[in-house]
Amino acid sequence: MTLTLDSLSREFFAVLSQDEKYPEILDLIKQNSAGNIWIIGGLVYKTIAGFLQGITPQIKDYDFVVEQSIPEIIVPKSWRVKPNSFGNLKFTNRKIGTKVDLVSLWRVYQIYERGLEPEISNFLSGVPFNIHSIAFNTTNLRIIGNIGIRALEERVVRVYDSEMARLYAQRYRTTVASLLHRKSEEIGFRVEL
């Protein structure tokens, strides 16, 4: 099956539209950022992997990358905020049962450590695993990330940036191989070392 950006974008947005929490979550992110907003991480790749396998995934949490976060954090009623394990903002709302991570591009380790411009393409070029190299732009409703799309088409999980994979594994106190296997099992893909 060849995945097209149009079909992926439409199907992914259809899943988001069915989540009653999404409008409130997107509003929260818009209040705390400026510029483009992208959804990244498991929500994107697990949802698309689900399309390929005929499974509707459960949306558990949201991860966003934004062009800029605002200096004064706005925390609406019923939401709480604290730093996540990477030092970025994690919003939680027990009432609606969700967690939301917000990362500004200029705070992304693989961007500032390599002296790159804070752009989504530079974010996608430095993710630990190939399946992470995909994002959904909430403004133009488009999926981006050829490496991530190819990983999903091939149904394979592999290391994409070895330094980031090693740091990611250290953060979770495990090995890269263990993380690869966990990610592949979550979506029913094979591991390629």
Image: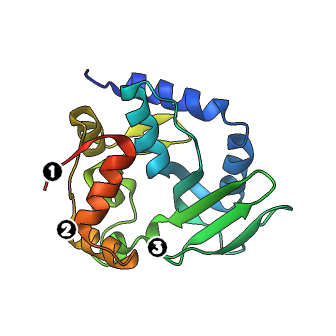
How many residues crowd around disc 2 within 10 Å: few (fewer than 14), some, or many (20 or more)?
some
Q: CA distance from mark 1 to mark 3?
A: 30 Å
Q: Is residue 42 visible?
A: yes
Mark 2 lies on a secondary structure that is helix
Front-most of 121 and 79?
Answer: 79
**Residue that label 2 marks:** 162
Q: Is residue 127 visible?
A: no
Q: Which of the two discs, 1 and 3, sits closer to the camera?
A: 1
Quadrant of the snapshot with the C terminus: bottom left
Whether the residues at callouts 1 and 2 have beta carbons within 8 Å, the answer is: no
Per the rendering, the mark at residue 192 is 1
Asked if the residues shown at circle 3 and circle 2 are in contact, with their CB atoms under 8 angstroms apart, the answer is no
Label annotation for residue 107: 3
Give the mark nearest the N terminus, 3 or 2: 3
In this orientation, which residue lies closer to the viewer: 38 or 193?
Answer: 193
Image side of residue 149 versus residue 53, left or right:
left
Disc 1 vs disc 2: which is toward the camera? 1
Give SS at disc 3: helix
